[in-house]
Image (tube, grey):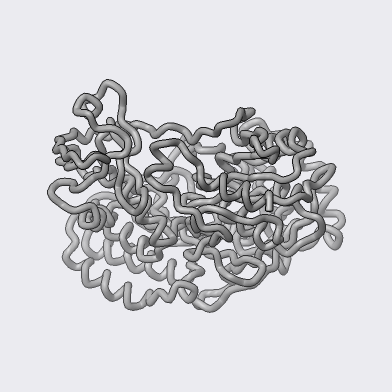
Amino acid sequence: MLTGGRKDAEAARGLLLELVRHPQEAGPETIVYAYVYLGYIEDRAGNRKLASEWFRKAVAVDGASSGILSLAREGLERPVTWIRHLDEPSGAVRAPAVQTPRPAKAYVAADPPAAMALARNLSASERRENFEALWSAIDTTYACFQLKSIDWAEIGRRYRSRLESIHGDDAFYALLSQLVNELEDTHSWLQNYRRTLWEPADVSIDLLEQRPVVVAVRAGSAVAAAGVAPGWEVLSVDGLSPAAKVEVLRQYLHACSSARAFRREAFRHLLAADQASSADVQLRSPAGATKSLTLPRTGGSRAQPATRVTDFELVRQTFVDFGRHPSGLGYIRIKSFNGREEISGEFDRALEALRDTPGLVLDIRDNTGGFGQPRIVGRLLRKRTLVAISYVKSGPRHSDLRKHEVYLDPAGPWQYTRSVALLVNDVTGSAADLFACELRSARRVVTAGTTTHGNLSGVAMFVVLPCGLVVRVSNGYIADATNRPIEGAGNVPDIAVEPTLEDFLTGKDTVIEKAVSALQK
């Protein structure tokens, strides 16, 4: 009732008031959310005094997660009329009507402020003030220092020495971006500053067999006219080897939680540069012929590789496709988790259509995440099950983490209890990594493919600096039921299958083949 632009606030208020009349039955986490939502409703209606009372009740509750409590504390200081998980539609960027004034001093909030313009013409003392504020906020907010063996004090010393030689605003904001990248955390980034990368629009590169390979060429382009086609290997870019070019690009690319995921992402941007220019590229065909091309970097959308195809018919929906494999097994592909109820609804339709199948192949390869989907996991559970363990910052020290076991119950009108194979790869991340973690923890799947991205650092907080920069920082992480963290390590498949260049060129899907064979056995 409160999600999206068309809200039924009155109906939601009635349900929430009924809920808070029975706090012992609901539990602390649910009650704090209820109080915060009631405060949010009143703030949106302009009833600031009443909203403050609800936020005060929320702050007084013990046992809730730090993220929602931080939002409640923020509600005591200023009106809360926008909450990210209620008001931000899938793939959209928040676009408020007015800009938020820059703060006099840095603070940490559970949600980012409305659009805030970056300060310009910063003095050396202002750059130093903002640097120290960010370093200190990350020091007390970030959750994975010990997990990743990060020496934040040493990093601070190193970047302070670089700060003295920085001149100009862009160089300063770029330095802060590199500082945040030292966390090697996909979920930590500069919210309102990012440098533009320019790339050729007529060709796309990806990593196959650990080599950069052309995977798409725009029809009718100069690249296509030169005879270059999917399967050609990139030998050099701007006179540099691919490995050397990746190191040049590292300062411009957003960090990833694992080296394998960063390598994949970096090679996808191998032809990029930080300015509009031309890329001098040397390529080699599968037959061994070489060709040199000069490609303009226009910054336009790149040619897209062909969508992964199946040799059997699929019913296609927005998020979930499904069909029957020739073996008789069911097949469901979840392309994205960038939705909520609509995804579980589409999955329900797919599962109902495949209810009589002897086993199920569940494909989340190339799914970069979105929102958690506990209801879908519950459709595959036989009983209440420990599916994950979360750790959330509970104090300023690096070791201050609160542990919470996450259980899920069977969901839906019935549960699919036959064997399930889960297909994953190194792009599978965030909510998709969580999905794999939960199903593996429940021992409900055999996994096939390559190790997932491993970006599962959990909830985020937002550091707001006097210069107007907003920085997202992960203040938690998630482990599986055996207490093995997924952040950085990823979900390691039971059946390791690395797709080859030949697989790509012939359209062969060896991962599905291995998964089907495992289910049949």
Q: Residue at x 82, y 58 (%)?
A: 383
Q: Is residue 400 visible?
A: yes
- Name the one closer to the observer, 254 or 92: 254
- Please determine whether, in this image, residue 344 is positioned above or below residue 176: above
Q: Residue 53 vs residue 282: left or right? A: right
Identity of the residue furthest to the top in this view? 220
Asked whether the viewer can see residue 57, the reply is no
Picture quadrant of residue 324: top right
Q: Position of residue 150 (x, y in %)?
A: 40, 74
Given residues 413 and 514, the one toward you in this image is 514
**Residue 492 coordinates in the image, percent (x, y):** 54, 62
Quarter of the picture holding the N terminus: top right
Residue 265 place in picture, x, y as percent: 37, 50
At 77% from the left and 35% from the top, the residue drawn is: 352
Image coords of residue 231 (percent x, y): 31, 39
Relative height, residue 342 to residue 159 (above, below): above
Q: Is residue 354 left or right of residue 109?
A: right
Q: Quadrant of residue 115?
A: top left
Q: How many marks?
A: 0
Instruction: Name the side, left or right, on which 352 lies relative to 311.
Output: right
Instruction: Write the residue at 68% across / 49% down.
Output: 520
Above or below, 349 relative to 375: above
Q: Nearer the viewer, residue 164 or 425?
A: 425
In percent of the image, x 35 and y 48: which residue is there? 207
